[in-house]
Amino acid sequence: MRIKRESLLQFMKMSGKDVDCLAHEIGISILDIEMLLLGQCVDIDTSRKFIRYFGSSEAQNLIDWETMGKKNPLSQQALPTRKAS
């Protein structure tokens, strides 16, 4: 998983959290946070903890889907449309 660096930095600034604090709260290493901020991929365990911490609604906005060549599975375009009964 890769994230939008600027979006994560904005969250950190607005919440007053530094790298150490955020890593501790998410339950990942400082190196993992640094990797995310450098635009590098992190492993599945780190990705799951990141998504669990932010919740899917917020995490989907922080994940850089385009860089990973994926479609956001929670975007309105990806969701199936329901027909009215």
Image: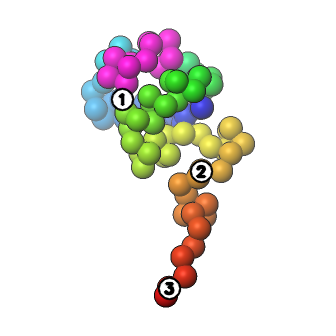
Query: Disc 1 to disc 3, how far (Cα)?
Result: 42 Å
Residue 57 visible, this orientation? yes
Q: Name the image quarter holding residue 42.
A: top right
Residue drawn 40% across and 35% down? 52
Are dots 2 and 1 in contact, CB under 8 Å?
Answer: no
Residue drawn 30% across and 35% down? 14
Number of labels in the image equals 3
Q: Is residue 54 magenta?
A: no
Residue identifier under label 1: 12
For residue 26, side relative to residue 68 (left or right) = left
Disc 1 marks a residue whose amino acid type is Met
Front-lying residue, 23 or 51: 51
The secondary structure that dominates the magenta segment is: helix
Q: Which residues are magenta?
A: 22-34
For residue 29, side relative to residue 81 (left or right) = left
Residue drawn 62% across and 43% down? 65
Give the mark toward the camera: 2 or 1: 2
Residue sitting at the far front: 85
Q: Name the image quarter holding residue 66.
A: top right
Residue identifier under label 2: 72
Residue drawn 65% across and 50% down? 71
| Residue 70 tag number | none
Residue identifier under label 3: 84
Does residue 50 sit above or below 74 in this rendering?
above
Tell me the SS state at disc 1: helix
Query: Disc 2 to disc 1, how far (Cα)?
Result: 23 Å
